[in-house]
Image (cartoon, rainbow, N blue to C red):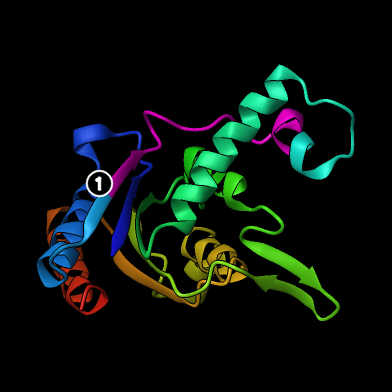
Amino acid sequence: MKLLHIDSSILGAHSASRQLSAEIVAEWVKGHPGTAVEYLDLALNAPNHFGADAIAVKGIAQPEPTAAQRAENAVSEQLVSQFLASDVIVIGAPFYNFSIPTQLKAWIDRLAQPGRTFTYTNKGPQGLATGKTVIVASTRGGAYSTSEGGQAMEHQESYLKVVFGFFGVTDVRIVRAEGLAMGEAPKAAAFRAARAEMELATA
């Protein structure tokens, strides 16, 4: 079994999502001995934002690709191949400005490749990256899951569920610690709740 561990927080050692994702990976490996873990730190090694050179080789008929286009295509190929080769993907996904870090979005944009992670049929899109488990270590300074207003402002977990579902991943598990900026007691309670969810998510 291959596990891909991804972090995207820019806060380094101060990051709650990094702490939570590391605990999830350790718990998974403890329960699934022999799991091979590969690590990708998107805060340190993020792909360029998706641009014309990145999409050109895949999506636009043209003569010979330029050097820039070949370089961007090589990055996309490496990332999508790494994703497709993984059975389990653990993602540290902090809540930034109601969504996910741009580094994580840039990685997802490289995965969204027709013929690799999805295809279009006469019945609509069909995901091709089936049979995988994605575990999201979701961290938030405020509390957004407990009210309709908060849920309407949340484009982090909801986005990740939609985009991985579009890729064909039906097993998306959320391990959430929210309210982390609301005081020490709420923060401690949030981590206790996340660790209880972690036991179920890594079983």
Up the image or down, 95 lies above or below 153; here it is above
Up the image or down, 58 lies above or below 65; here it is below
| Residue occupying image coordinates x 20% and y 64% | 190
| Residue occupying image coordinates x 52% and y 67% | 158
The foreground one among 17 and 127 is 127
Is residue 52 a member of the stretch shown in magenta?
yes
As shown in the figure, which amino acid type bears the numbered disc 1?
Arg
Is residue 107 a member of the stretch shown in magenta?
no
Location of residue 96 (image quadrant)? top left
**How many numbered marks have been drawn onto this rendered protein structure?**
1
Q: Position of residue 40 (x, y in %)?
A: 35, 41
- Quarter of the image with the C terminus is bottom left
The foreground one among 63 and 144 is 63
Location of residue 128 (image quadrant)? bottom right
Q: Position of residue 167 (x, y in %)?
A: 59, 66
Q: Position of residue 131 (x, y in %)?
A: 46, 75
Residue 181 is at least partly visible in this image: no
Q: Secondary structure at mark 1?
A: helix
Q: Position of residue 195 (x, y in %)?
A: 16, 68
The foreground one among 121 and 138 is 121
Up the image or down, 85 lies above or below 47; here it is below
Magenta residues?
38-55
To which residue does mark 1 refer? Answer: 18
- Quarter of the image with the N terminus is bottom left
| Residue occupying image coordinates x 37% and y 65% | 87
Residue 46 is at least partly visible in this image: yes
